[in-house]
Structures are given as C-alpha cells and as structure tokens.
Image (spheres, rainbow, N blue to C red):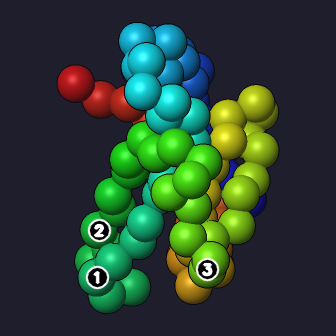
C-alpha cells in the first residue's frame, strides 16, 4: 500500500530518536482535490490516535491513516527532500 524511500526511513528514525515526548507514530493526512492533493505528515503519540484512523506497520514504521485517505495513498511513496 505505502512505501518509504531509504532516505525517508532514515530521517524519520532520526526524528523519532531525538523526540523525548512519546511521539512514535507518523500520521499521514490527505486533503484537497484528487487532481491537486495536499499531504500533511506529522509525528504523534499513540493517545492522539483518532477513531477513524487505522494503524499500519510499514517496514517497522507505525503509520496512522484515516480510513477515508487509504485509497488515495495506495501505491504512494514517502520520500524526504530538504
């Protein structure tokens, strides 16, 4: 369903290692039209999980995705660009 580049996986690991506040999940939210989607990625704690979100394990990365966004993220690749 969803993949991460090596660079994204490494950077996410670095961010999570630096975080002392219990942030351990990556939330991916999609908004906008299908022709011009906007993606919001944020680190959250497990107690911030919403009732409409599904937790996925993508190669050891815990990801929260709203049920409504799952089809829009099918086949997507997360990358990190500075």
**Residue behind mark 1:** 32
Cβ atoms at labels 2 and 1 below 8 Å apart: yes
User: Callout 1: 10 Å neighbours few (<14), some, many (20+)?
Assistant: few
Q: Is residue 61 above or below residue 56?
A: above
Expressed as whole percent of the image width and height from the top left, the position of residue 47 reads 56, 53
Looking at the rendered structure, the secondary structure element under dot 1 is strand
Looking at the rendered structure, the secondary structure element under dot 3 is loop
Between 81 and 47, which is closer to the camera in this rendering?
47
Q: Is residue 30 above or below residue 33?
A: above
Q: Is residue 14 above or below residue 75?
A: above
Residue 8 in view of the camera: no
- Disc 2 from disc 3: Cα separation: 19 Å
- Disc 2 from disc 1: Cα separation: 6 Å
**Residue behind mark 3:** 52
Picture quarter containing residue 69?
A: bottom right
User: Callout 3: 10 Å neighbours few (<14), some, many (20+)?
Assistant: few
Relative placement, left or right, of 52 versus 19 is right
Q: Residue at x 50, y 12 (%)?
A: 17
User: Callout 2: 10 Å neighbours few (<14), some, many (20+)?
Assistant: few
Q: Earlier in the sequence, mark 2 or mark 3?
A: 2
Q: Residue at x 70, y 67 (%)?
A: 54
**Residue behind mark 2:** 38
Picture quarter containing residue 49?
A: bottom right
Picture quarter containing residue 64?
A: bottom right
Expressed as whole percent of the image width and height from the top left, the position of residue 9 reads 56, 24
Q: Residue at x 55, y 70 (%)?
A: 50
- Disc 1 from disc 3: Cα separation: 18 Å
State which quarter of the image contains the N terminus: bottom right
Expressed as whole percent of the image width and height from the top left, the position of residue 7 reads 48, 20
| Callout in the foreground (1, 3) | 3
């Amino acid at each position: 369903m969803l993949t991460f580049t090596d660079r994204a996986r490494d950077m996410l690991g670095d961010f999570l290692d630096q975080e002392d506040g219990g942030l351990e999940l990556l939330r991916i939210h999609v908004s906008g039209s299908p022709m011009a989607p906007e993606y919001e990625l944020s680190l959250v704690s497990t107690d911030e999980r919403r009732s409409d979100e599904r937790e996925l394990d993508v190669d050891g990365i815990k990801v929260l995705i709203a049920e409504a966004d799952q089809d829009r993220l099918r086949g997507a690749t997360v990358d990190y660009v500075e």
